[in-house]
Image (cartoon, grey):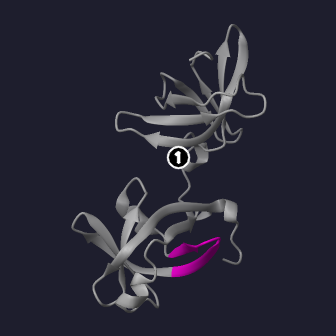
Amino acid sequence: MAGHDPDAMLHVGTITGAYGIKGWVKVFALTEERESIFDFSRWYLADGAAFHDVEFVDGRLHGKGLIAQLRDVDSRTAAEALRGREIWVDARELPDLDDGDFYWHELAGMEVWTEFKGREILLGRVDHLLETGANDVLVLKACPGSVDQRQRLLPYTPGAVVQRVRREEKRIDVDWHPED
């Protein structure tokens, strides 16, 4: 993975097995729109702590899943050898967004602040997000300077709980009681 920043890598899926005899692989995508995993011509497959880059050649929906063809993977045996490998992409290759928009992965690591009794209070840092169906949930972990050591779950509801996301400052302002 020469020339790539490991901190810029984004986990987008997993190879779940082989499809057919010509080296195609079954893919489980973590992208919001499943097929957008095919928008990246270069995938990086995790093999323990190492990444091996592969060239994505073709892909399509197949039944309820996805299948993909990778350069130099031309047999069922070669495809089976990739089972369980995580698929990563270079996040710097994501399309630019309009001002005010952001990707979900950018929220991880942001500090979450609320105002209470006229002062700003740090609730914690976003560890990850949960998709619940009704609305997404920010999972906050305590960090240096946070009001306490509690883990918090805050609904990601723009305008109600989430007031503003400040990408450049790595900060989210929320309307949330610090004791909740």
Q: Label 1 belongs to which residue?
A: 104
Residue 146 located left or right of residue 137: right
Q: Is residue 52 visible?
A: yes
Q: Quadrant of residue 126?
A: top right
Residue 175 screen position, x and y as percent: 57, 19
* Residue type highlighted by circle 1: Trp
Against 47, is 129 above or below?
Answer: above
The count of marks equals 1
Q: Describe the element under mark 1 as helix, strand or loop.
A: helix
Name which residue lies at 39% across and 92% down. 74
Camera-side residue: 5 or 93? 5
Q: Residue most toward the right? A: 145
| Residue 28: quarter of image | bottom left
Is 45 placed left or right of 4 in the picture? left
- Does residue 71 sit above or below 124 in this rendering? below
In the rendered structure, does residue 51 fall within the stretch colored magenta?
Answer: yes
Q: Quadrant of residue 68?
A: bottom left
**Is 50 one of the magenta-colored residues?**
yes
Q: Which residue is farthest left?
A: 63
Residue 151: percent from left, percent from top: 60, 31
Q: Residue at x 70, y 78 (%)?
A: 2
Disc 1 packing (10 Å; few <14; some 14–19; many ≥20):
few
Q: Position of residue 133 (x, y in %)?
A: 35, 38
Residue 144 horizontal side relative to residue 88, left or right: right
- Per the picture, the main secondary structure of the magenta-coloured stretch is strand
Q: Which residues are magenta?
A: 42-54
Give the farthest residue toward the top. Answer: 117
